[in-house]
């Protein structure tokens, strides 16, 4: 069976059908069928001859992939961000492998990966697209770079990312599916659910789940329900960046901001938006700085420990040395999370805030 042809036929059918309550059930069945065909296609492909992927060693405090169509200016932007020497030329497919660079911002070392440009159909394997998109699953965030001269590329890029089972700027749906031996499908909702009970059951049955208890704690779409069923999705934060802003007029930039809603507008040539992009990237990764202090000494304000928001004192102890967490007695804190300077805290589960100064006693 030609899975790709059948998937295309079903996708065309959905595009030609208007979605409403009357067609909701049909949409659910067809989308579940497409998900099943994609699963079979991937399984068939995995048993064949494998091609070489991109093997990149992760370094630093976080890893970000720079994603876009060919000749969109990824290598130029990477050079501007990190001062690297990524090969740059005015023709497509300059980058033939993954080129890493390290951005240092507020003490954080952010690894940025310049991957080959993808094309439409990348998620199906066109132009080594599967290998490029597979890199996304190993990273912590994505920069989706769009040429200001070709804003129509953004929807196509987002389709390829979605088809590669990566969900951008979404949380894992709060849905729990517990399979059982018998008893059919029982759906429990703690909120008002837009999907009909028949649609939910049809999607589950098309996915070969005939007996299960389903608990839905937030309103979900058919796609989100399928994501829970498939349970192989990656959820990543992303920034949409409009590049080559120097090649269009200010009026065009104004119109593009209204149409495309980019997070940042940049020009690697003039430097426009580069500092803002660094700051937005730092925030996107959820970094905070913790300054360590030895007893009776001043804190080291030049080299903060970079951790993620929500990090506890215990996690910092583990980062310093495993034994330190076991021997922990108390800590003294100066900064945003302390009630007063030098506050004594005996709870290792106490969460820290950006710019806290921490003195650990063991």
Image (cartoon, rainbow, N blue to C red):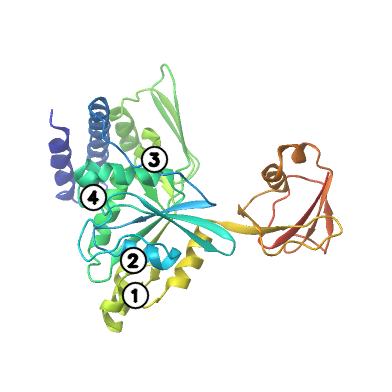
**Tag 2 and tag 3, C-beta contact below 8 Å:** no
| Residue that appears at 31% across and 37% down | 199
Alpha-carbon distance for marks 2 and 4?
42 Å
Residue 233 is marked as 3
**Tag 3 and tag 1, C-beta contact below 8 Å:** no
- Marked residue nearer the N-terminal end (3 or 4): 4
User: How far from the left and from the top, in percent, is residue 241?
Assistant: 36, 65
Q: Which residue position is annotated with label 2?
A: 76
Alpha-carbon distance for marks 3 and 4?
24 Å
Out of 82 and 342, give the one closest to the viewer.
82
Q: Which residue position is annotated with label 1?
A: 269
Relative height, residue 129 to residue 48 (above, below): below
User: How far from the left and from the top, in percent, is residue 8?
Assistant: 15, 42
Relative height, residue 151 to residue 362 (above, below): below
Residue 19 is marked as 4
Q: Secondary structure at mark 3?
A: loop
Alpha-carbon distance for marks 3 and 1?
36 Å
| Residue that appears at 41% across and 62% down | 84
Out of 295 and 39, give the one closest to the viewer.
295
Q: Is residue 187 left or right of residue 351?
A: left
- Marked residue nearer the N-terminal end (2 or 3): 2
Q: Nearer the viewer, mark 2 or mark 4?
A: 2
Query: Which residue is outermost to the right?
Result: 296
* Residue 211 is at least partly visible in this image: yes
Alpha-carbon distance for marks 2 and 1?
8 Å
User: How far from the left and from the top, in percent, is residue 187?
Assistant: 43, 33
Q: Nearer the viewer, mark 3 or mark 4?
A: 3
* Residue 263 is at least partly visible in this image: no
Relative height, residue 146 to residue 228 (above, below): below
Q: Secondary structure at mark 4?
A: loop
Query: Which residue is outermost to the top?
Result: 181
């Amino acid at each position: 069976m030609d899975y790709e042809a059948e998937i295309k036929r079903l996708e065309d059918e959905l595009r030609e059908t208007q979605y409403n309550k009357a067609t909701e059930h049909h949409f659910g069945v067809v989308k579940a069928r497409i998900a099943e065909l994609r699963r079979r296609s991937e399984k068939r492909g995995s048993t064949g001859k494998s091609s070489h992927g991109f093997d990149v060693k992760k370094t630093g405090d976080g890893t970000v992939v720079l994603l876009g169509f060919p000749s969109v200016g990824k290598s130029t932007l990477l050079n501007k961000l990190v001062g690297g020497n990524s090969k740059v030329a005015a023709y497509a497919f300059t980058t033939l492998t993954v080129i890493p660079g390290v951005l240092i911002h507020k003490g954080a070392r952010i690894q940025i990966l310049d991957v080959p440009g993808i094309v439409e159909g990348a998620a199906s394997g066109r132009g080594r697209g599967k290998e490029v998109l597979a890199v996304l699953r190993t990273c912590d965030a994505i920069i989706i770079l769009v040429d200001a001269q070709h804003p129509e590329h953004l929807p196509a890029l987002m389709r390829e990312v979605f088809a590669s089972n990566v969900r951008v700027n979404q949380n894992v749906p709060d849905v729990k599916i517990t399979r059982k031996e018998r008893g059919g499908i029982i759906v429990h909702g703690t909120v008002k659910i837009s999907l009909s009970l028949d649609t939910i059951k049809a999607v589950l049955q098309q996915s070969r789940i005939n007996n299960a208890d389903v608990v839905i704690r937030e309103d979900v779409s058919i796609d989100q329900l399928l994501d829970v069923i498939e349970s192989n999705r990656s959820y990543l934060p992303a920034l949409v960046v409009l590049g080559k802003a120097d090649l269009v007029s200010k009026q065009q930039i104004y119109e593009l901001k209204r149409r495309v809603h980019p997070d940042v507008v940049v020009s690697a040539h003039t430097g426009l938006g580069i500092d803002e992009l660094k700051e937005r990237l730092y925030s996107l990764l959820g970094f905070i700085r913790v300054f360590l202090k030895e007893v009776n000494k001043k804190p080291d304000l030049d080299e903060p420990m970079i951790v993620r928001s929500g990090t506890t004192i215990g996690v910092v102890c583990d980062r310093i040395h495993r034994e330190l967490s076991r021997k922990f007695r108390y800590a003294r804190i100066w900064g945003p999370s302390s009630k007063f300077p030098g506050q004594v805290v005996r709870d290792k589960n106490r969460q820290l805030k950006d710019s806290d100064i921490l003195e650990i006693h063991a």
